[in-house]
Amino acid sequence: MIKSIFKLIWKRKRRSTLMIVEMFISFLLLFALFAMVLKNTRSYLEPTGFDYENVWVVNMNIWGAGLSDEQNELIIDQLRRNILSMPDVLSLSNTSGNLPYSQSTYSTTMHYNDLKISTNRVQSDDAFAEVLGIKLKQGRWYNKTDEGNKEIPIVINQKLKEAMFGDENAIGEIVHSGVYKVVGVVEQFKLKGEYSEEPNNFFSRFEPNHFDRIFLLKVKPDAGIAFEEQLIQTASNIAKDWTIKVEPLSNYRKDAFQRTWIPILLFGGVCIFLILNIILGLLGILWYNINNRIPEIGLRQSVGASAGKIYQQFIGEMLVLTTLGFIPGILIAVQFPLLHAFEIEDEIYLLAILCSVFIIYMLVFISSFIPSIQAVKIQPAIALHEE
Amino acid sequence: MITLKNLEKVYQTDEIETVALSNINLEIAKGEFLSIMGPSGCGKSTLLNMIGLLDKPTNGMVEIEKNIIDGWRDKRLAQFRNQKLGFIFQSFHLINDLQVVDNVELPLLYRKGISGKERRKRALEAIEKVGLSTRAKHYPAQLSGGQKQRVAIARAIIGQPDIILADEPTGNLDSKMGNDIMEILEKLNKQEKATIIMVTHDERLANKTNRIIHLFDGKQVN
């Protein structure tokens, strides 16, 4: 049977090539879509390492008002005290602008022995871990006891720890030519949120008298609009010359989700539209093809083909064509894990290949099965006389 | 070998009821060469389709080799057709995208336990019997009408069926080619002892068979 199918495909080269190209394009589109969706789903399932709920962001345009550093520092201190005194505020942290879910990144290189490792850096005060509920795996978060030390205390994530120290203990290690001292290790910290890959990260304590434009506030769960109004009022009264924006961290998260999913949904929409067109085209071609071959179906029945064998013939032809379309598609797709393209894990690419193959086989099976059923329903005597 | 009792075929549409066959009773013996004659539309091909199990009668009974064909499922019918029946059609019904040898092999493709090698051997033997050995690798489009019909005969006999059903096998051929085809059928009947039932308009060819059945308006007239 399979040999006979190959013979027919070979003889109908022109039509077969069109089908093979359609399958090839469908496979590549689905592969790209699945790779993106699976990568993001997998990222989503991995914890971020922090808690965004009941956290508010106070974003202050400090340097736009033209005040001196001393004036700004006074305002920051006053703001900190007043906000902390609000009954709904549980804790407050001053941090650099690259807060979770934001698009800001502070990339740098960490030196350790002969290693030079690219990493993200977040600067903050001592309350950062408390506000974001960051759990430490080893050591501690930096605090007042680190004041006066020559090295800046840092907390690193496990990924950076493994890159620098492997299985060795990191706590107490002096890195970056004596600039930093590792005081703690966190299990995970995905700065860009759920859908991002975890980069190498380290958190460094603000040097004395240093501050930055972000306050992160951990608030009580029932803090709502009244709190927001009170917060804005308090901040505006103290920092009259600054532009201050207040919003929950969940809004940043929502924006980050949109940044991730909108391109995927657009691409997915285009893919689905293209694949739908291909499937409709395929269905049309198969209807046409099978209708043209009704006398052949009658003949095959007359020489002893059961309905099952007819299905096998037509579905088999399509599955063989589909497989021939997959071969170049898979050859291209396997280059991605081999080249470690886009920093996506090999399993994601392999799973994307499997999902694409499965979906297309299913669609092709259905598209060829339906017209086959219709054709086989015709009595052989009538089928033989169809022209 | 073949018994038809009170066979009736009615085509029913919403408005019209067309009686294609009515009260056909027929006994066909093993090894007989029978022709069915009658004007166009009298039900000759319908009768052949009933005998060939390609269509179901509205009423009556078809019995072939002591098997009463009633309520058989598709798979059993297909198997029976494959093993017992060989068909020859007026319009040849060859698959244009397959070579002659592949067309001839077709019935054996649906028979269990026959290897590809064995299929090929038997196909070449059948092609040789119809005198087309040199055309085995040709495609149908490269053959004349007479040659196409020979291929169809080879395909009908490859499975060594007991019964060959020929629906106007010479209808699309000139008289010379028609005679050639008739000779092959006669030879199959005499040498291979095949039971042949042939629908034809050609009285000259019908006279060469053992018996002629005449149909008129779906009824047997002799």
Image (spheres, rainbow, N blue to C red):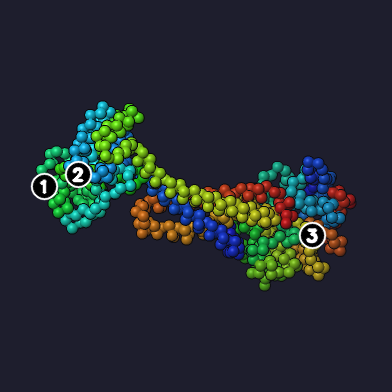
Which mark is nearer the camera, 1 or 3? Answer: 1
Of circles 2 and 3, the one toward us is 2
Residue B165 quadrant: bottom right
Per the image, label 3 sits on a secondary structure element best described as: loop
Q: Which residue in the protein does label 3 denote? A: B168
Q: Specify whether residue A298 is in view.
A: yes
- The CA span between labels 1 and 3 is 107 Å
The residue pinned by badge 1 equals A150
Q: Dot 3: few (<14), some (14–19), or many (≥20) neighbours within 10 Å?
A: many
Quarter holding the C terminus of chain A is bottom right
Which amino acid, mark 3?
Answer: Glu
Q: Label 2: which residue?
A: A68
Q: Chain of mark 1?
A: A
Image mark 2: chain = A
Of residues A333 and B6, the one nearer the viewer is A333
Marking on residue A341: none
Disc 1 secondary structure class: loop
Callout 2 amino acid: Ser
Left or right relative to A196: residue A91:
left
Image quarter in which the N terminus of chain A is found: bottom right
Real-space Cα separation, disc 2 to disc 3, in angstroms: 108 Å
Q: Amino acid at mark 1?
A: Lys
Residue A180 is situated, as x and y percent measured from the top left of the image, at 16, 49
Q: In the displayed structure, does residue B63 sit left or right of residue A269?
A: right
Marks 1, 2: nearer the viewer:
2
How busy is the neighbourhood of tag 2: few (under 14 within 10 Å), some, or many (20 plus)? few
Q: Going 13% across and 47% down the picture, which residue do you hit?
A: A151
State the residue in front, B21 or A119.
A119
Return the disc, 1 or 2, that comes first in the chain's sequence.
2
Q: Are marks 2 and 3 on the same chain?
A: no
